[in-house]
Image (spheres, rainbow, N blue to C red):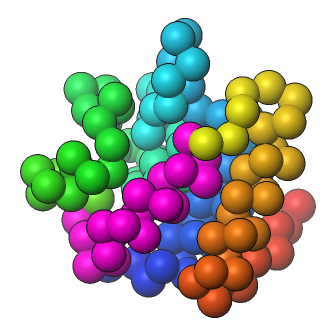
Amino acid sequence: MAMTLQEAFNASYIGVIKQGKKSVDTAGESLYNDGQGCRCGIGQTMPKDTNLMDRNGDSINILVRDHHPAIAHLTHIDRDILIEFQHCHDGAEIGKTFISEFKQNMNLFAQKYHLTIPTIQG
């Protein structure tokens, strides 16, 4: 089922903040799903059992181009917006400042696209 940009934003924002860290491999490259429960912003919009291990290094642009089923729920959203959305997670530094940088990136994204920052429960 297709997600609105607001629904995808909410899933990403809440999921990444609750996991508390960036989803990366040992080389520091962002991953949609690390196979151990840690997912990037766009990975948070996918069902938890989505296996993208063979495509983790691909940008959202490539997944859209290839009509990958894991992102079928997002393909109605403009590709450039999805690229910006992916960068909110991928562009934040690994480490202690990740969550604050991620929040800052997401806040700017929300302002640009007139989205509401979700409330995080518990």
Q: Main secondary structure of the magenta part?
A: helix
Question: Is residue 53 found left or right of 100 in the rendered image?
Answer: left
| Residue 36 in sight from this viewpoint | no
Q: Nearer the viewer, residue 38 or 100?
A: 100
Q: Residue at x 38, y 43 (%)?
A: 49
Q: Residue at x 84, y 68 (%)?
A: 121
Q: Split into 4 quadrants, where in the image is the N terminus?
A: bottom left
Q: Residue at x 70, y 81 (%)?
A: 111
Can you name the residue that lies furthest to the top here?
Answer: 26
> Which span is picked out in magenta?
72-90
**Percent of width and height locating residue 86:** 48, 53
Image quadrant in which you'd find residue 113: bottom right
Q: Residue at x 50, y 70 (%)?
A: 8
Vertical relation: 114 (above or below) 29: below
Question: Is residue 111 found left or right of 35 in the rendered image?
Answer: right
Image quadrant in which you'd find residue 38: top right
Q: Nearer the viewer, residue 86 or 72?
A: 86
Question: Is residue 50 found left or right of 27 in the rendered image?
Answer: left
Say whether residue 80 is magenta: yes
**Percent of width and height locating residue 95:** 80, 26
Vertical relation: 117 (above or below) 18: below
**Percent of width and height locating residue 13:** 68, 61
Q: Split into 4 quadrants, where in the image is the C terminus?
A: bottom right
**Percent of width and height locating residue 58:** 29, 36
Question: Is residue 105 found left or right of 57 in the rendered image?
Answer: right
Say whether residue 66 is magenta: no
